[in-house]
Image (cartoon, grey):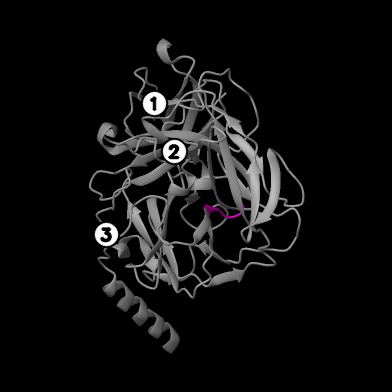
Amino acid sequence: MKKSFLLLCIACLTVCSHAQPEFENILLENKVYMDGIGSVTLRPVGMLHRDAIVSLGQGEGSELSLQFDDLKEESRYFKYTFIHCTHDWKISDMNPIEYIDGFMEDMIEQYDHSFNTMTHYIHYSLQFPTPNMSFTLSGNYILFVYDDTPDNPVLTRRFMVTEPETVGIEGHVHAASDVNDRFTKQEVDFSINTGSYPIRNPVMTVHATIKQNGRWDNAIYGLTYRSGHPGGLSFDYDDGRNTFPGGAEFRTFDISTLKSNADRIVGITFANHENQAYVLQDDARPFGAYESRSTMKGDCFYRNRDMVNAFSEDYVNTHFTLKSGFPFTDGDVYVFGALTDWQIKPEAKLKYNQVYQYWETDFLLKQGMYNYQYVYVPHGTNLIDATYIEGSHFETQNDYTVLIYFREEGTSYDRLIGAKTVKSE
């Protein structure tokens, strides 16, 4: 009884002190704020390549696993909390006590030191929700990790929590309906079976989001239904609002072994106190024919084939080179994909080598298998164009995640009542 009472008091004090947390220092997106933090993943427990989507409640499919490395190996006091968001990723108008059960923050206590690596790091892991802290509502969430206090942000990750009973979603990906985009874009049409959900005024209460592969920067938000029938809503458009550039199949390379050259690796050395790997030179292909290949849709998988020990994956300074028959005078080119956290990162920016007349860059990556592509960002904008260098084809294999949100009249948050991934054909 005394222990239970003490825990209750601590919880109440925590709630009071964090009832209105301030998050001015962070963005509501996937981002790393602290130097030395790398190889961040957030996935459902036991899944290698899945969106960070779980079901509300307990049991299979209700837990997420966060993994990341601290390459600076400094003494940290990592804590985390949850932030509930609207369907378009703004902070919900709710007090944390309304969507968090238990403490308002908790510690990341699981960590391990790397084993027999040239680049030493501490690997942190967190599996949640936990008995100390869980979420009680469905919807969009930010996992916010910080060092001791929220004033020292470490990373943020988006994740989604679905209702225990979701609406049925039927989706189909095909070439764009517009004849002008027929060979370069893909259209995502879908419908939902509302089932037992009593949805009134759906044009105001139901919103859909479509996400391509692992990207959020080009996601389509706020889609409302086009037509309806008893028990169902259709999101089948012909005006282009649900289309994406098909892009090209991702390029690949494999640095899971440092004893020999694996897939598309032309050299492995050790210099400047680091492992060095050289990826086969790439060519720009904006107008090339579609090339079919099996890929991970831009994802990556950490692995060390030379050693079976846990946390034995080393870091490798990986070199990229790009040959182009046209200049990049009005913008910059970056390596892009899960290997850059689907972000435009300074270290992934290519620079022109006047001697060899190609574009190049290099940065640290953890041992594993990777997908990547080259993207173009026009000067003065934040627009990421994955077609300028790679081209775009309606045949490209892409995964599209459809998310259905419902804000019931009289409530103050967006429930996630459906989620489904559909593949291009």
Of label 1 and label 3, which has the lower sequence position? 3
Q: Is residue 408 left or right of residue 268?
A: left
| Residue type beneath disc 2 | Val
Question: Which residue matches tag 2?
Answer: 167
Question: In the image shown, does 278 or 61 lie closer to the viewer?
Answer: 278
| Residue type beneath disc 3 | Glu
Residue drawn 53% across and 60% down?
68
Kind of element beneath mark 3 = loop
Kind of element beneath mark 1 = loop
Q: Residue lying farthest bottom?
A: 2
For the C terminus, the image quarter is top right
Residues at marks 1 and 2, CA–CA distance in whole angstroms:
20 Å
* Residue 24 - label: 3
Q: Residues within 10 Å of mark 1 (few under 14, many from 20)?
A: many
Above or below residue 304? Residue 280 is above
Residue 171, magenta (yes or no): no
Q: Residue 140 in the image: x percent, y percent?
A: 38, 49
Above or below residue 387? Residue 107 is below
Q: Which residues are magenta?
A: 42-48
Of label 1 and label 2, which has the lower sequence position? 2
